[in-house]
Image: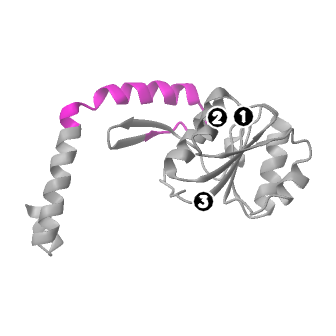
Amino acid sequence: MLVDLNFNGKYVVILGGGSESYRKTQSFVEAGSKILVVSKTFSRGIKELHTMGKLELLQSDVKDAEAFVKNLKPKPDLLVAVTNDHTLNAQLIKHAKALGCMVYSVDNPAASDFILPALAKIGEVRIAISTAGKSPAMARVLRQRIEKMVTQEDLLQIKLQTYARTVLKKRISDQKVRKQI
């Protein structure tokens, strides 16, 4: 089941500072989340987001997942484990779940509360592609194909229908009548 979650204003703690972390972080920046990225080093992209005021950084080499998670104040709505240490990711997920946080692990979809699908973004169109965590590479290939399928005409049609829908809602209160038009 694909669900579009609202993370606007939610506190998200992301562990890991590399390129994969940057890709995940961008999604939460776009969603309007309050973000803390924790790592001993940070990619250029993450540093740029910090410079732009989009997130906070904590330079730390987390070794004790339990102590780290218990000391997070405030408790995060979501903890994202994107380190290159499988054991650390598993421990972070375990202890965050014990505190009642939603969790996402880049290397263990089965332990995650959800999967971050590949997302095709064309204008106002968002299309999620998921392989249920089985093949992120194939999800990326499918995303690229889908992005090529949506045309400028499709995007203009969305604008036109948005305008028509707005006008109709103001003038016709009955939803069944609007649908017929």
Q: Residue at x 71, y 38 (%)?
A: 82
Range shown magenta: 128-154
Left-right relation of 64 to 147: right
Q: Is residue 132 visible to the viewer in this orientation of the structure?
A: no
**Quadrant into which the C terminus falls:** bottom left
Per the image, the residue denoted by label 1 is 17
Please check the rendered image and state whether residue 1 is part of the magenta-colored stretch, yes or no: no
Q: x, y (%) of residue 41?
A: 78, 31
Q: Residue at x 54, y 43 (%)?
A: 27
Tell me whether circle 3 and circle 1 mark residues in contact (CB < 8 Å): no
Please check the rendered image and state whether residue 132 is part of the magenta-colored stretch, yes or no: yes
Q: Amino acid at mark 1?
A: Gly
Query: What whole-number distance in Å separates the C-alpha atoms at marks 3 and 1?
Result: 20 Å
178 in relation to 121, above or below:
below
According to the image, what is the colour scheme of the structure?
Answer: one colour
Give the SS element for disc 1: loop
Q: For this rendering, which residue is in front, 63 or 102?
A: 63
121 in relation to 103, above or below:
above
In which image quadrant can residue 176 be found?
A: bottom left
Per the image, the residue denoted by label 2 is 46
Q: For this rendering, which residue is in front, 83 or 179?
A: 83
Q: Amino acid at mark 3?
A: Lys
Per the image, the residue denoted by label 3 is 10
98 in relation to 135, above or below:
below
User: Callout 2: 10 Å neighbours few (<14), some, many (20+)?
Assistant: many
Left-right relation of 109 to 171: right
